[in-house]
Image (spheres, helix red, strand yellow):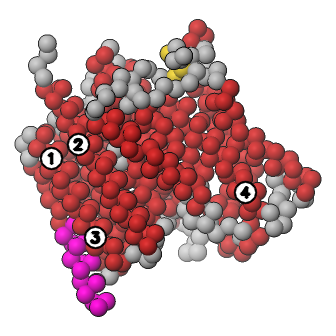
Amino acid sequence: MTGWMLDLPLTLGLFCAGAATLAARSLFGAVLGFISTGLIATIVWVRLEAPDVALTEAVIGAAATSVIILYVASRIGGGAAAPTPPHIALRVLAAILSALLAVLLALALLALPEQAPSLAGPVLEKIGPTGLGNPVTAVLMAHRAIDTLLESAVLVFAVFAIWSMAPDRRWGRAPGPAFVAEPHGPLTFLARVLPPIGIVIGIYIAWVGADAPGGKFQGGAVLAAMWVLPWIAGLIAPPSIRDMRLRLAIAAGPLVFLMVGLAGFAWAEGFLAYPPGYAKTLILVIETAMTLSVAVAMACMIAGPPERRPQP
Amino acid sequence: MSILVSLFAAACVLAGAFFFIAGTLGLLRFGDTLSRVHALTKADNLGLGLIVLGLLPLADSLADAFKLVLIWALVLLGGTTAAQLVASAVRRDQRPPE
Amino acid sequence: MAELLTGAAALIMLSALVGLARVLRGPTRADRLLAAQLLSTAGIGALLLLAAAGAPALIDVALVLALVGAFASVAFVMASRLIERR
């Protein structure tokens, strides 16, 4: 009963936040509508019993996407200007297609049998040998590890793609504008106090993913956010993109993952197979390297393409 | 004993929810942006503090209780800083162009 | 008890969603930012209540949300200052 008291306003709120994003008259208003939608979505994920996704939504939506979008908005030339709307026919067509998609999805969902087909049962049965307590992590790192390996490679490519947006003459510089630090301002205070706490929390979230909601991606994203904060406050300067340590950090995760996968030929049945009894150890090794890579890669993605001469 | 704990928790949680509602009312009804910043920050932090206070006796373990207090401290830290930043941005917007 | 906690969570989220009206009305960007801030704090409160009502793992979600809650405001101030300098 009280479940509905919570779910109904959430559903309506999600629609309203989306509508507010579309109806906003300034870019800033639209961005804030977008952030609000993300925050409501976090609670919705929780109500859909997907706390891992809720964690990701919380940290990416609030910390990563908002910073990226706002930085881009400031580069385009001001957030107070109204975005030029497309032609009315195009908007009507978009509305009709979106509504059609929503109706089709709803029909598909309603057509599912009472007990929707799911592999949750078999996954929980086979979770013993992995040594993990969180079925999501078990699927990501053991049953479908190949997907996770490919996704980790995508991270590296994403960083390449963002770096390649800079004109040739800026290659080798450091990303982002020069932020001016206010020695005693509130932002400087926050940037000094929050990161130590946040780093501990980030490592904790990455670590606890083995048995509870969490994992390398959420933990790594929190760590990246803890770098972004002092960067915006002007307390930290990003290194040049030529920096070998930077590149090594980004590549370390996928490389370790790949090596463990190849070693599977030697000590187990094949690619990405774990020898019995060592599954959890190997998974933790991979997750540690991946957390580092995710953190550095996300920080690079938020910082953007190279612009500035690096500090000596 | 347990009834007393439950009553205490319920009272704190409801008081906290009341303050949240008060904060939203302030956000919607106050006439000036700075007043809205003030109302929202104070009411929300107090509301969350009361909720945390009410949930502390219900916590499963010491670690969970510690997390509850940590969450409240983080919201306090983040919320006050955000309020300061927003207020300084409002001041900057209100300053007549030079 | 769990019903009461879930009900309180519903109350808090409802009040925050009503506060969303500020995002549309404005008039200044700071007002819209406040509505998002309200949503973030209310979300944390709701998550804590839901966690106590039966899902302890949600405390971690609330923890992360509390950690990054100020980022939207930080990003906004950053964007404003960058625009001014142009």
Mark 3 near mark 2, Cβ–Cβ under 8 Å?
no
Q: Residues within 10 Å of mark 3 (few under 14, many from 20)?
A: many
Position of A311 with respect to A70 (left or right) is: right
A282 and C20: which is toward the camera: A282
Answer with the quarter of the image where residue B36 lies.
top left
What residue is drawn where x is 40% and y is 27%? A234
Position of A12 with respect to A256 (left or right) is: left
Mark 3 near mark 4, Cβ–Cβ under 8 Å?
no
Q: Is residue A128 visible?
A: yes
Point out the tag, 3 or 2, that comes first from the N-terminus: 3
Answer with the quarter of the image where residue B16 lies.
bottom left
Alpha carbon separation for disc pair 2 and 1: 8 Å
Q: Residues within 10 Å of mark 2 (few under 14, many from 20)?
A: many
Q: Is residue A12 visible?
A: no
Reading the image, the residue beneath label 2 is: B83
Residue type at tag 4: Ile
